[in-house]
Image (cartoon, rainbow, N blue to C red):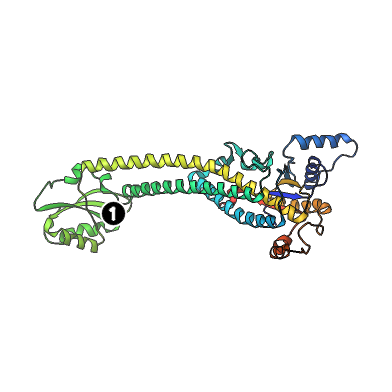
Amino acid sequence: MPSGSAIWLVASPPDGDASEQIVELDQKLNAILPSSSSSTATNGLNKLASSMPSLSTSGGVARVAPLTWPPFKTGTLSSLLKVSETCNKYDNGFTSSLNKIVETLRSLDADSLGQHLVIDEGQPWQAYLLDGWEWNRAKYRVEGKPLEELVESLQKEMSSLEAIHKQKQTSYNATKQQLAGANRKRTGNLSTRDLSTVLNKEDSFGLIQDSEYLEQLYVAVPKNSIKDWHANYESLTSMVVPRSSIEIVSDEDFTLFSVTIFRKVKDEFTQKARDHKFVVREFRYDEDAVQKQQSEQDELERSEKDQWTDLLRLCRINFSEAFQVLVHLKVIRAFVECVLRYGLPAHYFGAFVKPEPKQAKKAVQNLQTYFAPFTPKQDRQFGGKKKSGGDEGLVGEYQSMMEAELFDFVLFEVDDVEISSR
């Protein structure tokens, strides 16, 4: 069962004029009864089909929009089978690449994600399909081009988008990690953070300035061990200056004390302090180093902000481009599948269908009912018949793929990008 959150690309053999058929499909999906009292209603519907790209019905089963095929070059059976296999592989890869872009956008600005998932700087991705989708002939010329060449051009473009995205994201992540590391030093607890963020020059030198024998140490004491500190710091080693402990600052986990000892017992004092889970911190105030560190912090913050903005802008552009590439690939897939199922001439009806999420099953049933009468299952150009000559082995190789038909129409899904990327 196709997803009710996706937009469905459906196709089948045509049944008359495409503008009339899109109206009929809308009626069938949404159980609209056409008026039989006058031809005015029919003419009105035809005008609606030609003037309105989407025939949505509020409260109905699904919204319907026409799909106009470009003049694809059909090619041979062998080439079509290869294109079908290639498209299937690329579809998965393209979807993965698109999801990575969406996930990056989510990580950058989750609260406004929907505002970033737009086509050509403004059109929501759903509207791109439902409000008059057209093949981009300026970018992807189809006249006389083999389908293989079109598919490879799409693959080349997607690979380029993915490479650019990866490069920018890697650079941003590196800067973000640097900033996070710097912030941890500035904002961690007193056992790990940079003490220059809590101590000033006076705290650093205290009463001991350039003494040959004495040294002032800083010790981070767990809050639940403060009594232990006061009771034992003087006796951790010999040569600790009595009553030299001074409380400087506290956070949620630790209290920072200074204590004065003789230099010769520093290593022993540090080890004994560690045994009591007291953390001796190495620190000496250096004004030049403090200023340099602050300058580096400011530069990291500016760089992270600038790269965040650049990456967000790039992802918006890349999403627009990647989504269009994916849709163009799916249109080729649908066309190739139509030729393999229904044969020549290569004239088919196509539409985009957006079901109401809770009406997906009903939408499939209505589509099945609508397409069944004019969708032959046995009269196919390529599938379902034994071929002679060199194509027989090729058909056998792809037979399961060609016969894997769940519905009386071709259906491919364009996933909801906000959901599929999670």
Residue 251 % position (x, y): 31, 50
When asked about the image quadrant of residue 372, the answer is bottom right
Most distant residue in the right direction: 37
> Is residue 112 in sight in this rendering?
no
Dot 1 corresponds to which residue? 191
In front of the other: 147 or 48: 147
| Left or right relative to 339: residue 100 | left
Q: Which secondary structure, mark 1?
A: loop
Residue 331, image x, y percentages? 68, 48
Quarter of the figure that contains the N terminus = bottom right
Q: Amino acid at mark 1?
A: Ser
- Whether residue 91 is visible, yes or no, is yes
Between 278 and 115, the residue placed more toward the observer is 115
Instruction: Locate residue 136, reporting x and y percent.
Output: 64, 40
- For the point 70% across and 49% down, which residue is it? 9
Question: Residue at 61% of width from left, 53% of height from top?
Answer: 91
Q: Is residue 77 above or below residue 160?
A: below
- Asked if residue 395 lies left or right of residue 169, the reply is right
* Residue at the extreme left of the image, as rendered: 212
Q: Position of residue 263 (x, y in %)?
A: 12, 56
Q: Residues within 10 Å of mark 1 (few under 14, many from 20)?
A: some
Q: Nearer the viewer, residue 402 or 126?
A: 402
* Number of numbered discs overlaid on the protein picture: 1
Q: Please indicate whether residue 303 sits to the left or right of residue 384 in the image.
A: left
Q: Who's the residue at 79% across and 57% down the image?
A: 380
Residue beneath the point at 32% across and 54% down: 253
| In the foreground, 407 or 224 | 407
